[in-house]
Amino acid sequence: MIRSHKNQNKEVLFDYRPKCTIINGDSRENLVDYKGSVDLIVTSPPYADARKKHYDSIHPNKFPDWFLTFHESYWNALKPEGSLVINIKDKVVEGVRHRFVWRTIEKLIDAGWQAIDDYIWHKTNPMPGYWPTRLRDGWEYCFHLAKSKRPFMNQEAVKMPMGGWAESRLKKLGEGDKSRNNSANQSGFGRDLSRWVGKNTVLPSNVLSIALVGKNKGHPAVFPMELPSFFIKLLSPEGGLVVDPFAGSGSTGIAALSLNRDCLLIDTHKEYCDLAYTRLFFEAPRYSDITYSNISSIESVIQKKERRKTNQKGKRNGDGFVEDLLAMATPEYIQSVKEEREMYNAGKTKKHKKAFYKIPSRPSLSKRKYATGVLR
Ligand SMILES: C[S@@+](CC[C@H](N)C(=O)[O-])C[C@H]1O[C@@H](n2cnc3c(N)ncnc32)[C@H](O)[C@@H]1O
């Protein structure tokens, strides 16, 4: 329910609780109920043949056709101005790069997707190692695909400080900088630097420098929250719906709820859905609303994890996270988080009003959707 909406150009108060639904199942089957309602799909599919120990993986030669089996459900779920961001890394097979990633993107383009841009996630702390013909892997792709050539994009939301360059360069503007000139090397790129005087922010580049997740989150392929956060800010409106159809530990969900978007997380593995629910329960804003049909209570997930840990010999991927979780999740702490969540649910106390968040003025493209849209 919208509480007040006086002026589109000013900050307006909404009684809004972003909502996350977790579904344990196959995303090809579970997106059918969301036809035309999704603003952004941001995801990282299982890497070809790379994680056999943890979940089903697909041979690189078969990966493009396998991924195409998801095309229709993604296409139908997205709004016409919606976007699909795929974070994926290619693979070295018998010493050389296998090009299944390129082939997958080519197939998606043949199926009707527009290739809007290729982003690079530059890992500032790549894994050390030695390979006779290669260096350390320092980056991964993030492909931005869309249903149309002009998808929703809020560039204002990701602008960054212009930095030192502006101060030194703009102080000494020459005559050639004050009008749009061809560049000195005749590359055909012109610029009028005087346009930047007095401006403090600039668009970031399509290379995103983000560190790998250091802390074990109980899933073998957790991406850093900053990665989905960047695309959520850029490619979905506040109050919109974000989907991660290969949700894993739920990083996209935490990012979406923190940025006041609704989200839908789907994963075939119940263990990962449990993990995502647990992370969201503790890490997502308390005023957000989490629905997960497979679960009776947060205590039951934690107990199950504790049992799993004591039943196992030796350390397994995820145990570090489970230990941290168990150390943190004392009955008193769980109770306090539950109470905070329930308080927002009931919506009665004065404190609950702090959960009203301010929605800044938005680009005109989304105004109409906003007025009629998903806000409850
Ligand atoms: C690379 S992981 C995603 C990790 C996630 N980005 C995170 O930060 O935790 C891929 C996930 O896709 C899930 N998966 C594989 N096939 C699926 C399908 N058909 N539908 C839904 N999930 C699937 C796997 O269980 C796995 O957790």
Image (spheres, grey):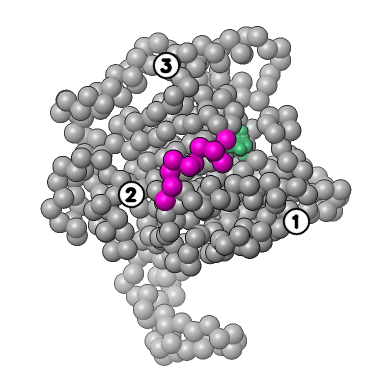
Q: Earlier in the sequence, mark 1 or mark 3?
A: 1
Identify residue type, mark 1: Arg
Query: How many other residues sit within 10 Å of disc 3, few (<14), some (14-19) or many (≥20)?
Result: few
Residue 131 — which label?
A: none
| Residue type indicated by callout 2 | Glu
Question: Which numbered disc covers residue 297?
Answer: 3
Which mark sits nearer the N-terminus, 3 or 2?
Answer: 2
Magenta range: 26-36
Q: Which residue is drawn at 38% across and 16% down?
A: 333
Give percent across and percent down for residue 139: 65, 52
How many residues crowd around disc 1 within 10 Å: few (fewer than 14), some, or many (20 or more)?
A: some
Measured Cα–Cα span from mark 1 to mark 2:
36 Å
Q: Nearer the viewer, residue 201 or 306?
A: 306
Name the disc covering residue 99, or none.
Answer: 1
Q: Quadrant of ligand 1?
A: top right
User: In the rendered view, would you say 335 is above or below 26?
Assistant: above
Measuring 51% from the left and 11% from the top, which residue is drawn there?
303
The quarter of the picture where residue 177 lies is bottom left
How busy is the neighbourhood of tag 2: few (under 14 within 10 Å), some, or many (20 plus)?
many
Work out whether residue 277 or residue 318 is closer to the camera in this orientation and state it: 277
User: Residue 201: where, in percent of width, then height?
Assistant: 37, 64
Which type of secondary structure does the marked residue at label 3 adopt? loop
Q: Which mark is residue 238?
A: 2
Whether residue 119 is visible: no
